[in-house]
Image (spheres, rainbow, N blue to C red):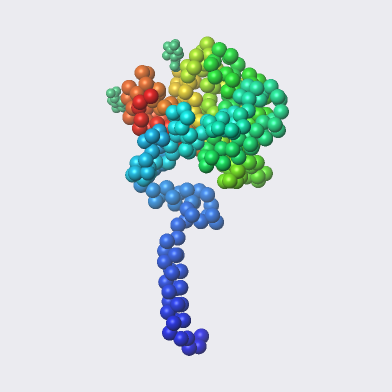
């Protein structure tokens, strides 16, 4: 290198210094070239306990002021009041039926009778577009329950009493999220496009419509084989199709509340089926781990989190 003028030397020094500073600030978790597990580990290592708790918490929208969200590192907000749009995720279960002039489609039970998965996929795609257009990235849908008991009041949320039909209709998931690439790793969530697609929820895990006498949120008494052959297959399909989120059922499985069921949520869904997305509680589902609800809230939170729930709706609010 020959002689350089002073300004150029200064410029070089600044560049070197900037490059050095950048190297110092290198964050492994932000580097897409790093393997996913390394990035997750790096991020977890950097987060404080308060940040982790906040990131597992979904609160009522009326509480979600910028100050609260910042102070408690809140991950998510939902609205439980009619007429107020949900700002994070939304129950767009038969079209974006929460806003004026959006397309409303038949409920799942009506879609099931079409026996046309490609139509259902297109309905998913339309819903995703309309939900995205209102700035919301999550859709709490579809319900992939296999409902064999019309006494259950929410039976219309089910595509069918026939497991095969429900399995086929999980096509709504690639409609909402986009088609998972052929070589993608099984169990890893997939959303194709942040402008046109949304995160889908497979719900409710598991057996929520097999309850005694069809009583809502009651007990589904079934042996493991029965569970695997009746209620589980659509979850398997959803995971293969890259569903990002699974929502837990209010109901119990042979006397064990699903929200506290570590064997099923962690043991089966996460470990056995290798679901790598996140598991969310149903709205206030944690509260009724105890009977009566809310009789030991710290216990309920602990039981839910230990069961494997990654995000808890309504951690903090206890009013109706
Ligand atoms: C199911 O319903 C019965 C009758 O209402 C009730 O006594 C029981 O506690 C419920 N079981 C669960 C698990 O919710
Ligand atoms: C609540 O549950 C915890 C266990 O998580 C227990 O230590 C505590 O005694 C319980 N409190 C009441 C009032 O039952």
Residue at screen point 59% across, 38% down: 130
Q: Residue furthest bottom?
A: 3
Residue at screen point 32% across, 22% down: 295
Query: Percent position (x, y) of residue 211?
Result: 52, 16
Query: Percent position (x, y) of residue 177?
Result: 60, 40
Q: Quadrant of residue 75?
A: top left
Query: Percent position (x, y) of residue 141?
Result: 56, 31
Indicate the quadrant of ligand 2 in the picture.
Answer: top left
Query: Percent position (x, y) of residue 223?
Result: 54, 18
Q: Quadrant of the C terminus?
A: top left
Foreground pick, 110 / 168: 110
From this view, report whether residue 214 is shown above or below residue 17: above
Residue at screen point 61% across, 29% down: 104
Residue at screen point 63% across, 21% down: 109
Please indicate whether residue 296 sits to the left or right of residue 118 in the image: left
Look at the image and tell me whether residue 98 can be seen: yes
Look at the image and tell me whether residue 260 can be seen: no
Q: Residue furthest front?
A: 101
Q: How many marks?
A: 0
């Amino acid at each position: 290198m020959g002689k350089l003028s002073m300004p150029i030397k200064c410029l070089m020094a600044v560049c070197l210094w900037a490059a050095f500073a950048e190297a110092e600030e290198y964050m492994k978790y932000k580097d897409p070239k790093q393997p996913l597990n390394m990035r997750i580990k790096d991020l977890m290592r950097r987060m404080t306990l308060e940040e982790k708790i906040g990131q597992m918490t979904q609160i009522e929208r009326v509480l979600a002021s910028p100050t609260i969200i910042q102070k408690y590192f809140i991950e998510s907000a939902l609205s439980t009041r009619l007429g107020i749009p949900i700002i994070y995720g939304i129950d767009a279960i038969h079209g974006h039926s929460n806003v004026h002039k959006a397309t409303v489609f038949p409920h799942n039970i009506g879609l099931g009778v079409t026996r046309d998965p490609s139509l259902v996929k297109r309905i998913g795609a339309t819903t995703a577009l309309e939900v995205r257009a209102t700035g919301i990235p999550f859709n709490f849908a579809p319900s992939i329950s296999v409902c064999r008991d019309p006494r259950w009041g929410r039976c219309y949320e089910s595509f069918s009493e026939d497991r095969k039909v429900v399995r086929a209709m999980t096509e709504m998931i690639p409609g909402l999220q986009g088609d998972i690439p052929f070589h993608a790793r099984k169990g890893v969530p997939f959303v194709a496009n942040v402008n046109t697609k949304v995160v889908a929820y497979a719900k409710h895990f598991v057996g929520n419509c097999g309850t005694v006498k069809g009583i809502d949120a009651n007990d589904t008494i079934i042996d493991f084989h029965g569970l695997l052959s009746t209620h589980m297959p659509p979850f398997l399909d959803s995971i293969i199709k890259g569903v990002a989120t699974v929502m837990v059922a209010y109901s119990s499985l042979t006397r064990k509340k699903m929200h506290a069921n570590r064997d099923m949520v962690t043991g089966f869904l996460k470990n056995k089926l290798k679901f790598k997305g996140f598991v969310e509680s149903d709205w206030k589902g944690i509260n009724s781990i105890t009977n009566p609800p809310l009789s030991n809230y710290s216990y309920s939170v602990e039981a839910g989190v230990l069961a494997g729930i990654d995000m808890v709706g309504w951690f903090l609010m206890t009013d109706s």
